[in-house]
Amino acid sequence: MGGAVIGGIRSRRANRRADAQLQREVDKNREWFDREYNADFTQRADTQRLINTTRDRLNEGLSRANAANVVMGGTAEAARYG
């Protein structure tokens, strides 16, 4: 009978440790979620790279259109808007 009591006590302690570890993981995940959810996604490096690449490609297209307009004899107003 003593062995059963000791086994029960050890089991309870192990369960408490497991519960505490699980709660720490839940808290850690909640903190990460709250931090990421409230972050400004436009300031991330991958988003900045996408924005800059898109802006560069649009500017290149506008430059080509303006150059074609000049070659074809278009007006200054048409060149300004691409």
Image (spheres, grey):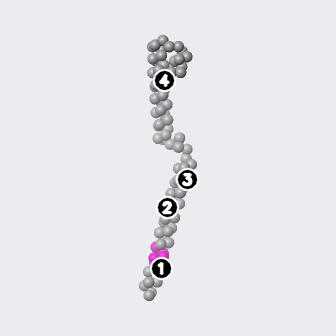
Q: Which mark is residue 34?
A: 3
Mark closest to the chain's N terminus, 2 or 3: 2
Q: Which mark is residue 40?
A: none
Quote the CA–CA distance across marks 2 and 3.
14 Å
Please give the residue where the numbered disc 2 appears in the rendered image: 25
Residue at 53%, 13% (x, y): give it: 75
Q: Quadrant of residue 68?
A: top left
Please give the residue where the numbered disc 4 appears in the rendered image: 62
Q: Callout 2, which amino acid? A: Glu
Quote the CA–CA distance across marks 2 and 1.
24 Å
Q: Callout 3, which amino acid? A: Asp
Please give the residue where the numbered disc 1 appears in the rendered image: 9
Q: Is residue 11 magenta?
A: yes
Could you say where residue 34 lies in the image, as x and y percent from the top left? 55, 53
Range drawn in magenta: 10-14
Mark closest to the chain's N terminus, 4 or 1: 1
Q: Callout 1, which amino acid? A: Ile
Quote the CA–CA distance across marks 3 and 1.
37 Å
Task: Please identify the quadrant where the N terminus is shown.
Answer: bottom left
Quote the CA–CA distance across marks 4 and 1.
76 Å
Marks 4 & 1, CB-CB < 8 Å contact? no
User: Is disc 1 surrounded by few (<14), some (14 to 19) or many (20+) residues within 10 Å?
Assistant: few
Could you say where residue 71 lies in the image, as x and y percent from the top left? 45, 13
Could you say where residue 38 lies in the image, as x and y percent from the top left? 56, 48
Mark closest to the chain's N terminus, 3 or 1: 1
Q: Quick one: which residue is furthest to the right in this view? A: 38
User: Is disc 3 surrounded by few (<14), some (14 to 19) or many (20+) residues within 10 Å?
Assistant: few
| SS for dot 2 | helix
Magenta part mainly helix, strand or loop?
A: helix
